[in-house]
Amino acid sequence: MKLYCTSCNYQFLPKTDKLPNRCPYCDKVGTIEKASQMQDLIDEVSQQDTEKEERNKH
Ligand SMILES: [Zn+2]
């Protein structure tokens, strides 16, 4: 679950399931909402470049 601040657009992952009262960035109260983009976490799975340049050590 990803959260974001409607005031400063700061996005973060909560440590618990509870919504924090205030934004950890701008410290405003009542501005935290759940982000609806669930596919953001999938971006963590990235393909590493398999291209390797073989160097001649001779
Ligand atoms: Zn904020």
Image (cartoon, helix red, strand yellow):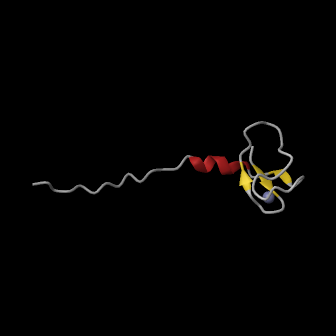
Image quadrant of ligand 1?
Answer: bottom right
Q: Which residue lies furthest to the bottom in this view?
A: 8
Task: Examine the image and state in which quarter residue 26 appears.
Answer: bottom right
Q: Is residue 47 left or right of residue 29?
A: left
Q: Residue furthest right?
A: 30
Q: Where residue 7 sits in the image (x, y, percent)? A: 83, 62
Q: Judge by depth and name the residue closer to the eye, 34 or 43.
A: 34
Q: Where residue 8 sits in the image (x, y, percent)? A: 79, 63
Quadrant the N terminus occupies: top right
The structure residue drawn at horizontal position 68% and vertical position 49%, both measured from the top left corner, is: 39
The structure residue drawn at horizontal position 74% and vertical position 52%, both measured from the top left corner, is: 37
Q: Where residue 56 sits in the image (x, y, percent)? A: 16, 56
Q: Judge by depth and name the residue closer to the eye, 6 or 28.
A: 28
Q: Residue furthest left?
A: 58
The structure residue drawn at horizontal position 23% and vertical position 55%, both measured from the top left corner, is: 54
Q: Residue furthest top?
A: 16
Quadrant the C terminus occupies: bottom left
Above or below, 45 against 54 in this view is: above
- Number of on-image labels: 0
